[in-house]
Amino acid sequence: MMENIFYSSIKEFETRSTIINSTKSIVPFSNFHIFVGFSFSDGHWVLFDSLANNIINEGKISGDPNKCLTLFHSVRALDENTIIFVNADHCQLSALNPYTGELHKKWKHKVPTIEALPKEKRSDVQKVDKAFAGLDIQVLKKSQKVGVLETVPTVNGENQYLVTVFNEDKLECQLEYSSLERNPMRLRPGDDENIFILSTRYS
């Protein structure tokens, strides 16, 4: 069920997902189409037309939901036809066209990154869950660069952050930032083309 905050209207639709009250990943497009990913299900998603009040398309991503808290992580719009997210089972940044149901072949970057979560730690469920808890992605709409913010555990009390920028077919740059600041850091777009801003959440 979805409700528009600008006027009194409730939208309801049925899906093939059998999970009740699952956390939802919701991404609105400018044409009033809405992507809904059912996070605690087996990867079901729906593309819904909120004006026509009908489902445009429906599908599911691959992955075993028993291996992770949620299959969809940090879902964002990449452009008017594409959403980008981290598939938590495959530890992979993935781009999906919900109109066709197809995954983009070049968006297959490892996330969490090897620098934040080395290969030898990926079989430890607790460490993988921690890596996802400190992970967020943001998108620069014009250049379609994707920034990934990760929190890297340290033993000296510092908070260490890793920012990695990807484009479609390569890792573009990566930087580390350490801070004794208790407020967690966040990543936000600075413009639509080439600037990300790393700041404290309550600055």
Image: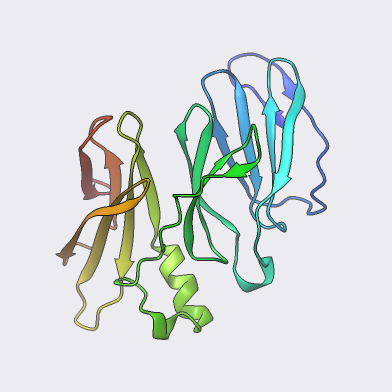
| Residue displayed at 54% across by 63% down | 88
Relative to 157, is 74 above or below?
A: above
65 vs 114, nearest the viewer? 114
In the image, residue 201 lies at what x, y percent?
29, 48
85 vs 125, nearest the viewer? 85
- Quarter of image, res 90: bottom right
| Residue 153 shows in the view | yes
Relative to 110, is 50 above or below?
A: above
160 vs 3, nearest the viewer? 160
Quadrant location of the C terminus in the rendered image: top left
Relative to 52, is 63 above or below?
A: below
Query: On the picture, is 181 further left or further right than 96?
Result: left
Question: According to the image, what is the colour scheme of the structure?
Answer: rainbow
Query: On the picture, is 29 further left or further right than 160?
Result: right
In the image, residue 187 lies at what x, y percent?
29, 47
| Tally of marks | 0
In the image, residue 92 lies at what x, y percent?
48, 60
| Residue displayed at 72% across by 58% down | 42
In the image, residue 71 lies at what x, y percent?
60, 59
| Residue 183 shows in the view | no
Query: On the picture, is 70 further left or further right than 45?
Result: left
| Residue displayed at 44% across by 78% down | 127
- Quarter of image, res 173: bottom left
Quadrant location of the N terminus in the rendered image: top right
Query: On the picture, is 86 further left or further right than 156?
Result: right
